[in-house]
Amino acid sequence: MSDRVQNRFQIRNQAAFIEEERQGITLAAKVRTVALALVLLWQAIDSTETGRAYYFNLLEIFIFVILGGLQYLAAQTHRTELRLQFFFVFIDCILLALVFTLGSPFDDNPLPPAIAMDTARFLYFFLFLMQASFSFRPLLVVWCGFSIILARLGMWVWFLSQSSVYSNLDMDEQNADALLEAASDLDFLFLGYAATELLVVLIVSSGLAIVVARSRRLVWNLLSTERKRASLARYFSPNVVNQLSDSGAEIATARQQEVAVLFADIMGFTKLCENASAEEVIDLLRGYHERLGKAVFDNQGTLDKYIGDGLMATFGTPDPSPNDPANALNCAFEMIEALKVWNEDRLLSGIEPIRVGIGLHWGVVVAGDMGNERRLEYGVIGDTVNIASRIEHLTRDLDAQLVVSDELVCAIQKNGNVPNLYCLTLAGYQEIRGRASGLKVWVFSAT
C-alpha cells in the first residue's frame, strides 16, 4: 500500500478518533454537571449558613455548573481543541482553590485554616481529574494533575502566609505529644498532609494518564482493525477475514498463483427487465447477488466483483489450498440450487424465473491490489480470467447451466474426487475466442 493511501487511512482513523474524543468530553461534561448539581442540592439542604452567605455559597457551586455547561456546549459545537480544554481545567482548579481559600465575604465566622484545608474538601478536586480522564487525552489528565497541585500549593502558601497560622516547621519540638497538642489548634497546619496530598495527586494523575494512553491505543487499534476487516469483508468470507486480520498478512503485493475462477451471469437479463421498474430491477439484482454471494463465502471463495447482472469469484485467494478446485465446483452447484429454490418462490408469486449461466476454469493468475491511489481493489488478472469469462458464455451455445473446463476437473481429481464431479457430462472440445485450439469442457444441465 502506498504512503499516500496509508496517510488517507490514518487521516480517516484520526477523524474517527477525534469524534470519539469529542463524545468523551461531552459525556464528561454531563457527568460533571450532574455531580455538581447533586453537590449544589446537598449544600442547599445541609448548609448551616443563612442569609446572603447561604446564597453566596450556592452561587459558587452554580458557577461550576455553568462552567460544565460551557464545556458541554464547546464539545457539542466541536470546539474540543486541546488549548481550550487546558483552559477549562485550569480555571476549574484555580476557582475551586479560591472558593476554599477565601470563603464567603458575607460570612461573619470564616472557616479556620485547619478546616479550610481539610482533606475531605480537597477530594472535590478529583472530580476534575475524573472529568479529564473521559477525554481520552493523556496530556489533559497530566495537565489536570499539575493544575490541582498548583492550586493546592497556592492554598497552602496563602494560609501559611497568615500571621496567626503556623506549621510543624515553626514548632520548637516535633515529637508526638507536641504534634497532638498542636493538632487541636485550628490555626495549625501539618505540612506532612500537604506532602501526602500532592504525592497522591501526582501518583493518581500519572496512573490515570497511563490508563488513558493505553485505552487510547486500544481504541486506535480497534479502529484500524475494524476498518481493515470492513475492507477485507468486501471480498473474503468471514473465516478468511478473521485469518487475515489475526495474522496481519499482506495481500496487496502482487503474486502469481493457481486459482479457480467463476463467472455467473443472468441469461436474457435485458428481456427480463424491459418492462420492470427501476425498483424491481434493483430488488432482482439484490436478491440474485445475495444468494450467489452467500454461496461464494460458504465455500471459502473470494468475491472479486459484481458486474451488473454478473458475478466474478475466485477460489484460492488470498491463500491457496488443495480444496480450491472442489470448493469452486461446490459453489457453482450451491448457486444452482439456491436459484432453483428462489425460482420456485418467484413462480408462486407470478414472477418470471431467472436462468443463470456459470463458467469455471482453473489456472495461473496474477493477484493483488489494482487501481490507483484514489481507488484500490483486490483482484486477479490473466489469461485464466479471460478464459473463465468465455467459458461462461458457452452456456448459451451448449444450453447448459454450468460449463467447467477440463483443467478444473483434473485439478479436482488430483486432490480426490467430489460427489458433484459425477454430475458433469463431457461436452468435448469447444472453440474459445482467443485460443488457437479448442478447450475440453464439461457441462451440467438440470433436468
Image: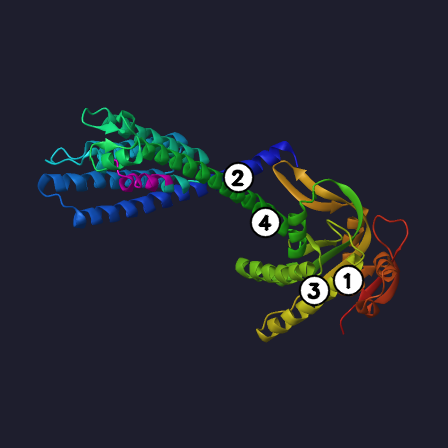
Residue 230 shows which numbered tag? 4
Q: Which amino acid is tagged 3?
A: Met
Q: CA distance from mark 1 to mark 4?
A: 27 Å
Determine if the magenta segment contains residue 348.
Answer: no
Front: mark 2 or 1 = 2
Q: Which amino acid is tagged 2?
A: Arg
Left or right of 52 in this view: 4: right
- Local crowd size for mark 1, using a 10 Å CA cut-off: few (<14), some (14–19), many (≥20): many
Tell me, yes or no, whether the two marked residues, 4 and 2, touch with CB atoms within 8 Å. no
The span picked out in magenta is: 117-129
Question: Tag 3, which secondary structure?
Answer: helix
Residue to which mark 1 is pinned: 329
Q: CA distance from mark 3 to mark 2?
A: 37 Å
Q: Is residue 309 visible?
A: no
Q: Residue at x 60, y 62 (%)?
A: 287
Question: Tag 2, which secondary structure?
Answer: helix
- Local crowd size for mark 3, using a 10 Å CA cut-off: few (<14), some (14–19), many (≥20): many
Question: Which tag, 4 or 3, sits closer to the chain's start?
Answer: 4
